[in-house]
Amino acid sequence: MALFSLFISCEGIGSFSTQLRAENPYEAIRSFLGTSQLNHFLSAHPEWPQDFALRDVYAFIPLEGLANLYFCGLGQKGKYVQIHLVQTVQRSSATKRYCGPRRKSVTLR
C-alpha cells in the first residue's frame, strides 16, 4: 500500500494535515472520510457541517503536470473543504537523507 499525505484546508477556519496508507488516491479519500479527524477539527465550529462524506465530493482531479498530486473538493451547505493529496515516497533507509536521482552539476553557456 502507498503512503498518502493529506493537506486539508477548511475555508476561513484553518487547516491540518495527516497521513494514511491506501491502495490509490480514491481509497485514501474514502479512508480519510471514514475517520473522525475532519469532524473533530470542525467540532469547534458549529456553523460547519459535521458529516462530510463521499456524497459531498464535487471535484477529484490529478493536478496536471505533477506526479502523484491530487485535489479533492468537498462542499456542503456553502462550506468548502479542500484536500491536496500527495503520494509520499518513503526513504529507503533511515540513515540516507535522499533516495532520488542524483543531480549532476552542469555549466550553462
Image (cartoon, grey):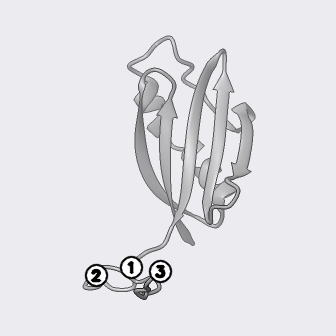
Asked if residue 41 lies left or right of residue 32, the reply is: left
Q: Write down the residue under mark 2.
A: 94
Q: Which mark is residue 108?
A: 3
Residue under the point 68% across and 61% down: 65
Q: Earlier in the sequence, mark 2 or mark 3?
A: 2
Q: Hey, which residue is sitting farthest left in the picture?
A: 95
Q: Residue, x 60% and y 55% (percent of image)?
A: 28
Q: Nearer the viewer, mark 3 or mark 1?
A: 3
Q: Nearer the viewer, residue 99 or 3?
A: 99
Residue 53 coordinates in the image, percent (x, y): 65, 35
For the residues labelled 2 and 1, the Cα–Cα distance comes to 7 Å
Can residue 93 be seen in the rendering of this structure?
yes
Q: Position of residue 44 (x, y in %)?
A: 38, 19
Q: Quadrant of residue 100?
A: bottom left
Rendered view: 109 above or below 60: below
Query: What's the residue type where badge 2 is placed?
Result: Ala
Q: Are marks 2 and 1 in contact (CB under 8 Å)?
A: yes
Q: CA distance from mark 3 to mark 1?
A: 31 Å
In the foreground, 59 or 47: 59
Q: Which residue is mark 1?
A: 91
From what the image shows, is residue 43 above or below residue 15? above
The residue lying at 56 percent from left, 53 percent from top is 85
Q: Secondary structure at mark 2?
A: loop
Q: Residue 25 location, x and y as percent?
A: 64, 58
The three-letter amino acid code for the residue at tag 1 is Arg
Query: Would residue 61 be found to the left or right of residue 66 on screen?
Result: right
Judge the density around disc 2: few (<14), some (14-19), many (≥20) Cα neighbours within 10 Å.
few
